[in-house]
Amino acid sequence: MHAIREAMATMHKRSEAIPPVSKAVESLVRQVIAQVADKWTMLVLEALEEHGTLRFTEVGRTVGGISQKMLTKTLREMERDGLVIRTVHPVIPPHVDYTLTELGRELSAAFCGVWTWAETYHAEVSAARRAFREREEG
Amino acid sequence: MHAIREAMATMHKRSEAIPPVSKAVESLVRQVIAQVADKWTMLVLEALEEHGTLRFTEVGRTVGGISQKMLTKTLREMERDGLVIRTVHPVIPPHVDYTLTELGRELSAAFCGVWTWAETYHAEVSAARRAFREREEG
DNA sequence: TTCGATACGCACCAAAAGGAGAGTGTCGCA
DNA sequence: TGCGACACTCTCCTTTTGGTGCGTATCGAA
């Protein structure tokens, strides 16, 4: 009855058995990946990589289609993870600058391959999707 | 009153003004990126890249910590986008194999840099997070 | 003979993602 | 005098993500 749950539970044991070292490190890497492999993070990374320093609304304009809520959240998380530096100029009306850190620039470079992949193969993805839909319907 | 909304609305116009070509392509690329830049997709990609062909529960075991529901969903989406091939052997008990397509292998290679980044810098991300927390509290 | 494994689909629920709209406080421009 | 820009925050709402548990058909092993 609980066959699946037990099968799923064993996977931890197996993955322990194959690589006996670096268990906590892999968990950390996954955690970092999970937060970094995010649509908005990738887009903001790109925007700041291309334009250097941007203000809050400029980031929004460059990314395009993001709400202020998500923009604030994404930038805060990126600041927390050491990907961007947030500089507040204590003036009114407010002026806040965002720039990539070295860490952020490295990550942006790492994502470069994924952008290239998407630009190269997006037509094939679309084709695969059409074929899948037709197979489902027909 | 509607200053922000109008400012956000202008971003589409600006991004049109800067790159006058390839508007639909960029939209497509983003759409593809948004679906591919996903935690589970990345993990399944990795699992299949390393082990070649895997059965449903084997993928689950290799990825680790994923529920069958999310595994099913992720694998279906990857099949739809042409990243994996799903082979059903009509036997009972059921037997289904998953393998990466060439497209999937290319994407996996593209994500390689991100994995390297995470392995190289996860300690720095942790440090940045600690520093941020202390600054917030202190 | 009964249990466990296989690869799911379905129903129910909680949490997170994400959007829309309002409000804030002051400055500079019309 | 009054509106717009700035960089947010807060609330309300919907959608998506994700988890848990149940059921299924049959085969091989205990």
Image (cartoon, coloured by chain):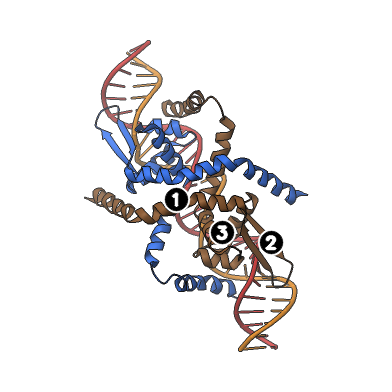
Chain colours: A blue, B brown, C red, D orange
Query: Do discs 3 and 2 share a chain?
Result: yes
- Crowd class of label 3 (few under 14; some 14 to 19; many from 20; radius 10 Å): few
Which comes before the other along the chain, label 1 or label 2?
2
Residue at mark 2: B87
Residue type indicated by callout 1 = Gly
Q: Which mark is residue B70?
A: 3
Chain under callout 3: B
Chain under callout 2: B
- The residue shown at (54%, 56%) is B45
Residue at mark 1: B113
Which comes before the other along the chain, label 1 or label 3?
3
Where residue B133 appears, as percent x and y from the top left, is 28, 51
Figure check: A88 above or below D20: above
Circle 3: element type: helix
Which comes before the other along the chain, label 3 or label 2?
3
Figure check: B9 above or below D12: above
**Looking at the rendering, in which quadrant would you find the N terminus of chain B?**
top left
Q: Nearer the viewer, residue B18 or A75?
A: B18
Chain under callout 1: B
Where residue B109 appears, as percent x and y from the top left, is 51, 52
Could you tell me how far apart the alpha carbons at marks 1 and 3 are, in whole angstroms? 25 Å
